[in-house]
Each structure stands twice: as C-alpha cells, then as structure tokens.
Image (tube, grey):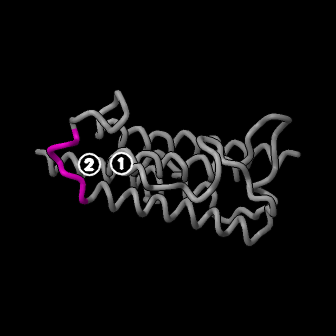
C-alpha cells in the first residue's frame, strides 16, 4: 500500500505542476510563454506579480525538499524567505534563470519524493507539525493555488 501511496503523491505533484490534468492548467503551463515584462506586471500597489509567485513557489518546493531530507545545509539560491526579492536586474535573462530555477526545484523535489522511504510518509516532517505526506500534498495544492492566481493575473493584464 505504501508504494501505491507514493505513486499517487507523485501523480498529484506532477498534475499540479506540468502534466495534463482534468482540472486544467498546472503551474508550469500558467507561466508558459510569458515574457519578463508580463511577469513583472502588477495588478496594483502592494500586489504580487507573476515573477514573485514563481520565486515563492520555487522557494517552497525547496523547503519541502529540505524537510523531507532533514538537511539544514540545503540553501535556496535567492536571498530571503517565503517571498524572495526579485533580482536587481529583472531582465529577460534573469526571468529565464528564475523559470529554470522553478523547474530545477521541482525536479529535485520530485526525485526526493521518488526515493523517499514509504515508511516515513506518515511520520511528522522535520521541524513541522505536518506529516511528510501532508507536505507533499500541500506543495501540490500550493502549485495549483498559485497557477490559478497566475491565470487570473494574465487575464487582468490583458484588460489593462
């Protein structure tokens, strides 16, 4: 049963990020084709833009991986936490690097889950009150939440 549970968690993670799913566009699909200018657009003062959401989702993929591996030496490549700051030079090259960062953080997290001991899925996560399985479900839900947010930002941008 545990191996089937891990397979289901991986399917959930994949559908939320970059696989075809009945619910529609996942996180990766929501940013496909966006330029750095699109990603920098804000719907209003104090509101997040797509680029910030990309960094935020990459950061939390990193945190879940760190909790699963219990490795405090893992460091996120951008300064800050939760909502890392945009790069000082927010140009097309920086956007491509941060999109690649999101992809890499997802790939690393997925690899960690694929080899994660199934006997530890129900155990509490490192430095957390949530179980390891709840962290995995949660990061998939997090991707979908922000995918919807990005889809809405794209519609709002077209109307301005």
Relative horizontal placement of residue 152, taking residue 135 as reference (left or right): right
- What residue is rendered at 64% in x and 46% in y? 80
Q: Nearer the viewer, residue 134 or 70?
A: 70
Residue 117 is inside the magenta segment: yes
Q: Position of residue 148 (x, y in %)?
A: 60, 42
Say the numbered circle drawn on residue 12: 1
User: What is the tally of numbered marks visible in this picture?
Assistant: 2
Relative horizontal placement of residue 81, taking residue 39 as reference (left or right): left
Q: Nearer the viewer, residue 81 or 73?
A: 73
- What residue is rendered at 17% in x and 48% in y? 118
- What residue is rendered at 51% in x and 49% in y? 24
Marks 2 and 1: CB-CB under 8 Å? yes
- SS for tag 1? helix
Say the numbered circle drawn on residue 144: none
Q: Going by the picture, which residue comes out furthest to the bottom?
A: 93
Q: Position of residue 95 (x, y in %)?
A: 71, 64
Callout 1: 10 Å neighbours few (<14), some, many (20+)?
Answer: some
Image vertical order of residue 128 relative to residue 33, above or below: above
Quarter of the N terminus within the rendering: top left
Q: Position of residue 5 (x, y in %)?
A: 20, 45
- What residue is rendered at 54% in x and 49% in y? 59
Relative horizontal placement of residue 1, taking residue 130 as reference (left or right): left
Callout 2: 10 Å neighbours few (<14), some, many (20+)?
Answer: few
Relative horizontal placement of residue 79, taking residue 49 as reference (left or right): left
> On the image, which quarter does residue 38 sit in?
bottom right
Please state the extent of the stretch shown in magenta in the rendering.
115-121
Say the numbered circle drawn on residue 8: 2
Q: Nearer the viewer, residue 139 or 68?
A: 68
């Amino acid at each position: 049963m545990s191996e089937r549970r891990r397979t289901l968690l991986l399917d959930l993670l994949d559908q939320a990020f970059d696989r075809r799913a009945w619910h529609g566009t996942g996180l990766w699909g929501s940013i496909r084709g966006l330029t750095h200018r699109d990603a920098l657009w804000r719907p209003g003062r104090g509101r997040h833009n797509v680029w910030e959401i990309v960094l935020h989702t990459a950061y939390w993929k990193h945190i879940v991986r760190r909790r699963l591996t219990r490795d405090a030496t893992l460091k996120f490549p951008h300064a800050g936490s939760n909502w890392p700051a945009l790069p000082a030079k927010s140009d097309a090259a920086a956007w491509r690097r941060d999109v690649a960062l999101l992809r890499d953080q997802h790939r690393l997290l997925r690899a960690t889950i694929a080899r994660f001991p199934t006997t530890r899925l129900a155990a509490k996560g490192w430095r957390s009150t949530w179980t390891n399985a709840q962290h995995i479900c949660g990061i998939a839900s997090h991707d979908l939440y922000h995918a919807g947010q990005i889809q809405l930002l794209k519609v709002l941008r077209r109307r301005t």
